[in-house]
Amino acid sequence: MKVSKWSKLILAAALMAAGFAGAADYPERPINGVIAWGAGGGTDTASRLMSPIVEKIIGQSLILANKTGATGAIATQAVHSAAADGYTLLFHAENPQLYQVLGLSTLSYDDFEPAILSVQGSTVIVVPKDSPIKSYADLLKEAKANPGKLSIGTSGVGGQPWVTSMLLKKVDGITFNPVAFQGDGPLVTALLGKQLDVSGLPIGIASQYVRNGDLRALAVMSSKPSSSLPDVPHITQLNPAFTESMKASGFFYGVFVKKGTPQPILDKLTAAYKLALNDSKFQDYAKTNGLEVIGLSGKEAREFLNTWRSQMSWLIYDAGAGKESPEKFGIPKPKN
């Protein structure tokens, strides 16, 4: 992919204007990127699409590797154990903001700095294309008639499919039999093979299969219609009782460095990733897959992370799914 000389000039100007002379020699060698989810998932796809663009901008290779397990906690720990020098990046989603409440790890994004929060999106409740469940009403009827019987594919405790199941339990009182996979890729394979009854997939993954007729979408977990799946009802349209929960629902992807990374290096990474987000190929990918490009960094990113954690941590704890109270970690309860 060709990056114009103007992109490089914009990056250089941004660095000079902010006084980032200390980052002039960075990076001097290839950068390692740890993707917290398996191949073919939403985090993996978005990360690998941005990386060639960033490589052209910074003039070094990004060596990406998938490190799965424990809802991304293994990858998170691996990056936190590395040096805070900008040569080990974490490509992850929203999950670390729930680790403490769920008892998965003592780490959270308080232990990292966001180089960029790239996109955010909703999950989509889907079933295999030949499923007798043809609507959200059908799902409710079947789940209530057979509590805990329908299998729901998840990417582990704290992943978006699992969070979706907790939301359905809290608001509509339905329970499932969870089956965990190491990321969205193998989960989709199981759905296509009719090994699962239902799941909640990130919209960037769900859209292509729904449009191709390989999966049937029952609802978008959002308070507004989706541009990529305009014919699929959103959940508050089906049940207004979800309105409050939708303030915190959804996922986001980002690129993070260990806290303590020199600010000039962090700033250089941020500038490069912001240019990558504006690349036409990435913009087209986001639009096609119903993702909103947010491009947050610095104080704005930190506020976004804290607000999301406050809302979702308490929602999960109040639903009876948390092992620890958010209060234990100083996570404030959101004001209605």
Image (tube, rainbow, N blue to C red):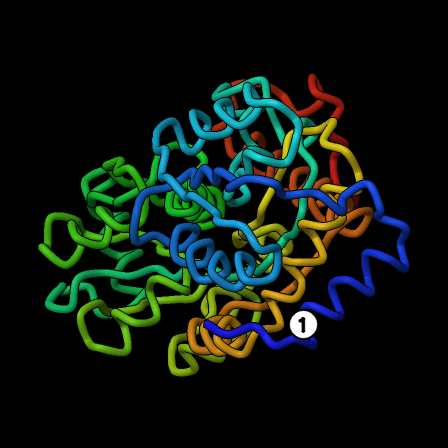
Kind of residue sitting beneath label 1: Ser
Res. 49 image quadrant: bottom left
**Whether residue 336 is visible:** no
Q: Write the residue at 90% across / 59% down.
A: 17
Residue 143 position in % (x across, y down)? 26, 49
Residue 198, given in percent of the width and then of the height, sits at 24, 53
Q: Residues within 10 Å of mark 1 (few under 14, many from 20)?
A: some
Q: Secondary structure at mark 1?
A: helix
Q: How many marks?
A: 1
User: What x and y, as percent, mark residue 95?
Assistant: 51, 38
Q: Report the residue marked by disc 1.
A: 7
Furthest residue to the bottom? 231
| Image position of 314 (left or right of 37) | right
Horizontal relation, residue 144 to residue 91: left or right: left
Relative image position of residue 22 (x, y in whole percent): 82, 41
Quadrant containing the N terminus is bottom left
Q: Residue at x 41, y 64 (%)?
A: 203
Query: Which is nearer the eye, 104 or 109?
Result: 109
